[in-house]
Image (tube, grey):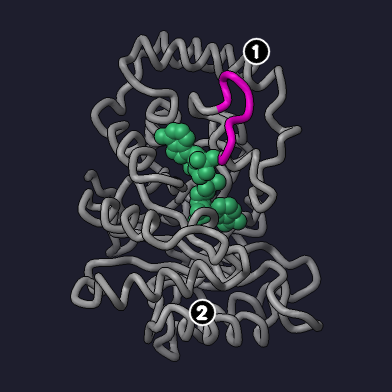
């Protein structure tokens, strides 16, 4: 594993981290995902990313992860960075959604119970809340540090200007923002338009979610939608209508470049994100140990020739 310093902090993160959004819920089978966690940790993946609502059903990924921690990793807790989040719809009524102090703190307490942990390493505001003062949301994150329930603060999907405001507030509370978690892949590049500069200037790390565009940036969908894939599952977030002809044409061309680099497309998509040193970690999902192993092998070739980058750019921009 290669580790990168997370912004201006004392924390190193593995350049590949594992997310438990899909494949670890109550609808999934326990043994395979237990093995995925083992494989990840053995390969030096020290960072596991969760959220209150991961499952389905919501909360079940945290419960399952807690069981695995208890069974297999009790003596390794201090070698791990475990994160969770609150911000999306979690429970009925007005207090289980968005960014109020009430929601964030109640939710973290629930997450700790589900994972059977005393604290998480990173607690995130999962999304910006246009209706709640930012002072309240950031104040709640800071309180969780002061009460010992989290060690670092993070924000997810905040656009550049709001990220700057959040960073300023967190600095003033002496609980600086450790990390930002945006969606970032060859197919989703909004962060390049200002956010990455804000992160770099403020010494905030970046962990890219859905780096494989939920599986689109692999060879999985080259010949249609396979059974059991995320796009085929009722519980999968990727919709079949997102697997468009136009996208698959691009994927086919990108796959050709990956082959010339002796890489799988998944490996190239990960390496492409890590070429920017401000990207601390790439947060992959995996439904099997084989996928994880494939993704880990990207570390063998993270370098790009100028010509390769130009060809990739041409495909992404013009098809
Ligand atoms: P990816 O883009 O890495 O997609 C993962 C999926 O891609 C897998 O489930 C699998 O699909 C497929 N896949 C992975 N590796 C391979 C491979 N080598 N070959 C073929 N197919 C492969 O990430 P996710 O969308 O899962 O997101 C990763 C993490 O990011 C989440 O678990 C979560 O922690 C975080 N996240 C955060 C969000 C936020 O709002 N902050 C939102 C979304 C995610 P299949 O299941 O079909 O086999």
Quick check: 131 left or right of 272? right
For ligand 1, tell me if the residue under mark 1 lies within 8 Å: no
Q: Callout 1: few (<14), some (14-19), or many (20+) C-alpha neighbours within 10 Å?
A: some
- What residue is shown at x 57% (from left), y 26% (from top)? 221
Which is nearer the eye, 117 or 155? Answer: 117
Q: On the rendered image, what quadrant is the N terminus found in?
A: top left
The residue nearer to you, when weighing 22 against 179, is: 22
Instruction: Name the element at disc 2.
Output: helix
Would you say residue 86 sits in the magenta stretch? no
User: What secondary structure characterizes most of the magenta part?
Assistant: loop
User: Which residue occupies 48% across, 64% down?
Assistant: 50
Q: Nearer the viewer, mark 2 or mark 1?
A: 2
Q: Disc 2 or 1, which lies upstream in sequence? A: 2
Image location (x, y in percent) of residue 51 = 54, 67
Whether residue 246 can be seen here: yes
Does residue 200 appear left or right of residue 22 in this picture?
Answer: left
Along the line of sight, the residue nearer the viewer: 51 or 176:
51
Q: How many marks?
A: 2
Q: Which residues are magenta?
A: 221-228
Residue at (80%, 83%) from the top-left corner?
A: 93
Which numbered dot is residue 111? 2
- Residue 234 x, y percent position in the rendering: 69, 49
Which quadrant of the structure image shows residue 229? top right
Examine the rendered structure and indicate whether residue 123 appears above or below residue 283.
Answer: below
Crowdedness near tag 2: few (<14), some (14–19) or many (≥20) residues, C-alpha within 10 Å? many
Compared to residue 285, the image places residue 221 above or below, namely: above
In this rendering, does residue 214 appear at all? no
Residue 80 drawn at (x, y percent):
28, 66
Q: Which mark is residue 9?
A: none
Q: Secondary structure at mark 1?
A: loop
Residue bearing the label numbered 1? 319
């Amino acid at each position: 594993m290669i580790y990168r310093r997370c912004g201006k902090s004392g924390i190193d993160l593995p350049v590949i981290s594992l997310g438990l959004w899909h494949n670890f819920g109550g609808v999934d089978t326990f043994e395979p995902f237990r093995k995925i966690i083992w494989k990840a940790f053995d390969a030096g993946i020290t960072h596991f990313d969760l959220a209150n609502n991961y499952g389905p059903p919501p909360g079940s990924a945290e419960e399952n992860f807690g069981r695995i921690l208890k069974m297999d990793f009790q003596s390794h807790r201090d070698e791990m960075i475990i994160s969770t989040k609150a911000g999306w719809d979690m429970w009925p009524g007005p207090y289980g959604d968005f960014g109020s102090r009430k929601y964030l703190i109640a939710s973290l307490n629930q997450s700790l119970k589900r994972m059977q942990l005393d604290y998480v390493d990173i607690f995130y505001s999962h999304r910006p809340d246009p209706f709640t003062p930012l002072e309240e949301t950031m104040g709640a994150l800071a309180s969780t540090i002061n009460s010992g329930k989290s060690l670092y603060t993070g924000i997810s999907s905040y656009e550049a200007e709001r990220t700057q405001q959040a960073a300023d507030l967190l600095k003033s509370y002496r609980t600086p923002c450790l990390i930002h978690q945006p969606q970032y892949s060859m197919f989703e590049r909004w962060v390049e338009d200002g956010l990455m500069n804000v992160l770099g200037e403020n010494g905030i790390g970046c962990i890219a979610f859905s780096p494989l565009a939920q599986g689109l940036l692999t060879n999985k969908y080259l010949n249609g939608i396979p059974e059991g894939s995320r796009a085929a599952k009722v519980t999968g977030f990727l919709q079949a209508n997102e697997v468009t002809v136009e996208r698959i044409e691009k994927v086919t061309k990108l796959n050709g470049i990956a082959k010339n680099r002796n890489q799988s497309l998944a490996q190239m998509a990960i390496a492409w994100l890590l070429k920017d040193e401000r990207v601390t970690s790439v947060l992959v999902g995996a439904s099997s140990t084989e996928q994880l192993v494939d993704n880990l092998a990207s570390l063998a070739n993270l370098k790009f020739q100028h010509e390769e980058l130009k060809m990739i750019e041409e495909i992404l921009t013009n098809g």
